[in-house]
Amino acid sequence: MVTKRENVLPDYRWILLAFGFLLLVYLLRPILAPFLIAAILAYICSPLVDRLGNLKLGRLAVGRSVGSIIVMLMLIGIVILLLLIVVPLVQKELLLVIERLPAYLAAMRSRLDPWLLNHFDVTLAIDPAQIQEIISKNWKTAGNFAGQFLLSVSNHGLALIGWVVSLLLVPVVLFYLLRDWHILVAKVAEILPRRWYAKTTTIAQEIDRVLAEFLRGQLSVMVLMSIFYSTGLWLAGLELALPIGLISGLLGFVPYLGISTGIVLALLASALQFTSLGQIIPVLVVFGLGQGLEGMLLTPWLVGDRIGLHPVAVIFALLAGGQLFGFSGILLALPVSAAIAVGLRHAKHSYLASDFWNR
């Protein structure tokens, strides 16, 4: 009787193990960001490493280690290229904005003061000369960047060191994950209970297919939209076209964040650059066309309904992940959402096939 009862009782050890794992992840959330970034990059780039590792140069095979290094150098090169493009442009345009801001405020005051005086008997208390003086003083102070940087390091040294260590951890962890990706997957498969192995493998393969299609499709949309916004804003005459276009496209992985951020930045840059409303209209047309192109053509074609979640559910998952785990939670939100969506589909099929539903 005891043996029969032990077989009937559910095994709570796996539930406790899962709960302990989730608790550990929650407690370690401040240090998870570099590992999650490396894991996501390794997941995306592992197929490329597979192809490079299988290449042969004469009698010599490239190997997975060399392939991992090549992929990492490619990723670092892309990041450096983006920084070399965006940072000088933003610095140059900030100088132009600082030079033009007093003139813009003076023009705005000359137009608004008569209307405010006639309707409300007030005027704008804006002194362009004083603003110019404040900007000049602060700009000269900002020129002493080295001194301010050293002062910041002395005041927040531990936080800065922690941030630098986290940043340097990403390529180190990424290299080992890329090199040993299949070994790590095999080790995880080894520890699975044999009675769960077949079902777990089926669900894992479906999650892998859904997530891989979604991530690669979303990356394609981000690149194409960055090119579209940069080109469109440049044709519209916006001087900050390239950085705003890149930001608008690359932030597209969060629903509505890329388009809203891009419009706000473009309107601010247009207000400081252009002198009439008619010059701003082409900028808005670019974002309108971009939203239509992304929503009606690129996303359905390249991404589709890959993750199996409604856009509202995706937004909720991103916000919930950010609230619970910060930046790490945002990185983890979509993979976890994809896994939950696949799990819910299998649970639904099991429920519809059960006697409980058929009664």
Image: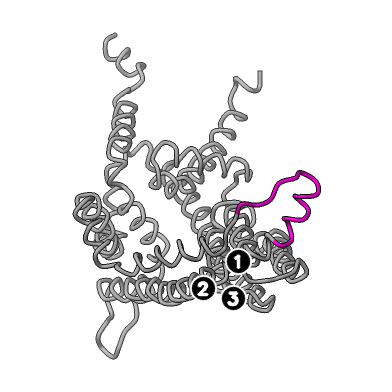
Residue drawn at 39 percent across, 71 percent down: 79
Q: Nearer the viewer, residue 11 or 324?
A: 324
Find disc 1 in the rendering and name its residue: 269
Q: Residues within 10 Å of mark 3 (few under 14, many from 20)?
A: many
Determine the CA span between mark 3 and mark 2. 8 Å
* Residue 61 in picture, x, y percent from top left: 27, 81
Secondary structure beneath label 1: helix
Q: Residues within 10 Å of mark 2 (few under 14, many from 20)?
A: some
Which badge, 2 or 1, is on the more N-terminal residue?
Answer: 2
Mark 2–mark 1 contact, CB under 8 Å? yes
Mark 3–mark 1 contact, CB under 8 Å? yes
Numbered tag placed on residue 239 in the rendering? 3
Q: Is residue 118 magenta?
A: yes
Q: Which amino acid does label 2 sit on?
A: Glu
Find disc 2 in the rendering and name its residue: 93
Q: Which amino acid does label 3 sit on?
A: Glu
In the rendered structure, the answer to whether residue 286 lies left or right of residue 157 reads right
Mark 3–mark 2 contact, CB under 8 Å? yes
Span shown in magenta: 110-125
